[in-house]
Image (cartoon, rainbow, N blue to C red):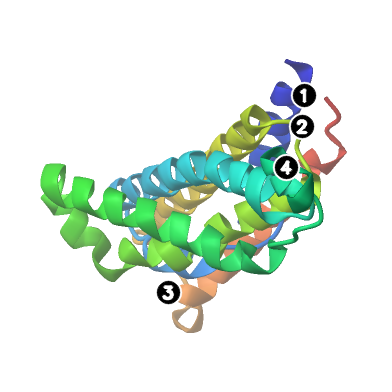
Amino acid sequence: MEELLSTFVRSIFVENMIFAYYLGMCSFLAVSKNVKTAVGLGAAVTFVLVCTLPINYLLENYVLKEGALSWLGDQYATVDLSFLSLILFIAVIASFVQLVEMLVEKFAPGLYSSLGIFLPLIAVNCAILGGSLFMQQKEFAHAGVATVYGLGSGIGWLLAIVGIAAIREKLAYSDIPKPLKGLGITFIITGLMGMGFMCFSGLNI
């Protein structure tokens, strides 16, 4: 339980996909113009992370890495399919993104039109692929930890995009120097928020 809690908190605050690794910046900057759209995209990213990380964990540990197929017999103990990991991870992610796109189009057509091309682009969102690649590096004890890591990473990304969207909505009424309007001030605020999240780097659970 302590490992799950530590993984969850660290993935939200200490190892935030946006502010620690700056992954998923394209969608983060493009869709963060209003809070409602940001919440929708953040929820979609969280859903995809929660669903794909445990599946990719099982693929990694029971199919892909060297010795993972030993459960089939001793003759498979030396088989190494790790060269296929990137392709299979992306295939799993793309499948779930397609499911999310169908669900959003069916039940939230307004959000679907607001997100536009950025909804199917979740499939190539480097924050989601990064979650699976970090999962490989961290060598989690079991699929439950990978699921919690995916949930925490998704919530961290959701907090980041909703936070910047709320700030950008307020900035519409602010007197900003003309050269900094738009992406200029957004980059500055993102950097400041990243520095703020660095305060969590000493957090030890």
Q: Is 92 located above or below residue 203 in the figure?
A: below
Residue beneath disc 2: 141
Q: Does the image show residue 93? A: yes
Question: Which residue carries the number 3 mark?
Answer: 182
Label 1 element class: helix
Considering only order in the chain, which callout, 3 or 2, is on the residue closer to the N terminus? 2
How many numbered circles are shown? 4
Q: CA distance from mark 2 to mark 1?
A: 10 Å
What kind of element bears circle 4? loop
Question: Is label 2 or label 1 in front?
Answer: 2
Name the residue located 52 percent from the left edge and 39 percent from the top edge: 155
- Left or right: residue 90 versus residue 47 is right
Element type at mark 2: loop
- For the residues carrying marks 4 and 2, which lies nearer the camera in this image? 4
Q: Mark 1 Cα within 10 Å, few/some/many (few <14, many 20+)? A: few
Label 4 belongs to which residue? Answer: 73
Tell me the residue at 45%/56% (across/down).
93
Q: Are marks 4 and 1 in contact (CB under 8 Å)?
A: no
Q: Along the polypeptide, which appears first: circle 4 or circle 2?
A: 4
Q: Residue at x 30, y 56 (%)?
A: 98
**Badge 4 local density, few (<14 within 10 Å), some, or many (20+)?**
few
Give the amino acid at mark 2: Ala
Residue underneath mark 1: 3
Left/right of residue 122 with respect to residue 139 in the rendered view: left
